Amino acid sequence: MSQHRHPADTVANNPQSDNFSPADALESLHTEIVELEALAHAAGEAVTLLPRPANATQRRNLTRIYALVSKVAADAATAAAHGDKLVASLAAHLEAGRATRERAEPDRQPAKN
């Protein structure tokens, strides 16, 4: 290519960087928590399938591992349930805002010439 390509004149010199969406962020966080919950429950099931401990030290270690995995699973389930409530609250809030805006704006008819 002998000639350098230039961007079109319509491209903004300062692109808008404010593309953060709280709703999308909450949904993404909730999805990650649900995935973590699933992994924690799977780890709990895997721990129960481990062979029977041969001595007191192994039994103590297995008990600690199981307690830790169970705690993480319970905390993840609590966080996921809280996330469900937050997502539902956000949906209700957005719908209420939409309804308020619709009541505040009169129906606009196109101008007749």
Image (spheres, grey):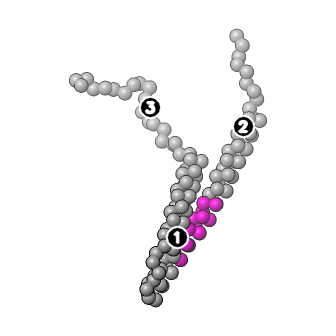
**Residue picked out by circle 3:** 12
Q: Residue at x 74, y 39 (%)?
A: 99
Q: Residue at x 70, y 43 (%)?
A: 95
Q: Earlier in the sequence, mark 1 or mark 2?
A: 1
Above or below, comparing residue 107 to residue 103 in the picture:
above
Where is the C terminus found, in terms of image quarters? top right
| Contact, mark 1 vs mark 2 (Cβ under 8 Å) | no
Q: Is residue 8 left or right of residue 63?
A: left
Q: Position of residue 19 (x, y in %)?
A: 52, 42
Of tags 1 and 2, the one toward the viewer is 1
In terms of secondary structure, where does tag 1 sit? helix
Give the quadrant of residue 55.
bottom left
Above or below, comparing residue 77 to residue 108 in the picture:
below
State yes or no: residue 50 in magenta. no
Dominant SS in magenta: helix
Q: Residue at x 24, y 25 (%)?
A: 1
Q: Position of residue 37 (x, y in %)?
A: 55, 62
Above or below, comparing residue 2 to residue 104 in the picture:
above
- Mark 3: which amino acid? Ala
Q: Position of residue 21 (x, y in %)?
A: 56, 45
Q: Specify whether residue 6 is in view.
A: yes
Q: Is residue 111 left or right of residue 27?
A: right
**Residue picked out by circle 2:** 101
- Mark 1: which amino acid? Gly
Front position in the image: 71 or 62:
62
Of tags 1 and 3, the one toward the viewer is 1
**Residue picked out by circle 1:** 44
In terms of secondary structure, where does tag 3 sit? loop
Q: Which residues are magenta?
A: 67-81
Q: Residue at x 64, y 60 (%)?
A: 81
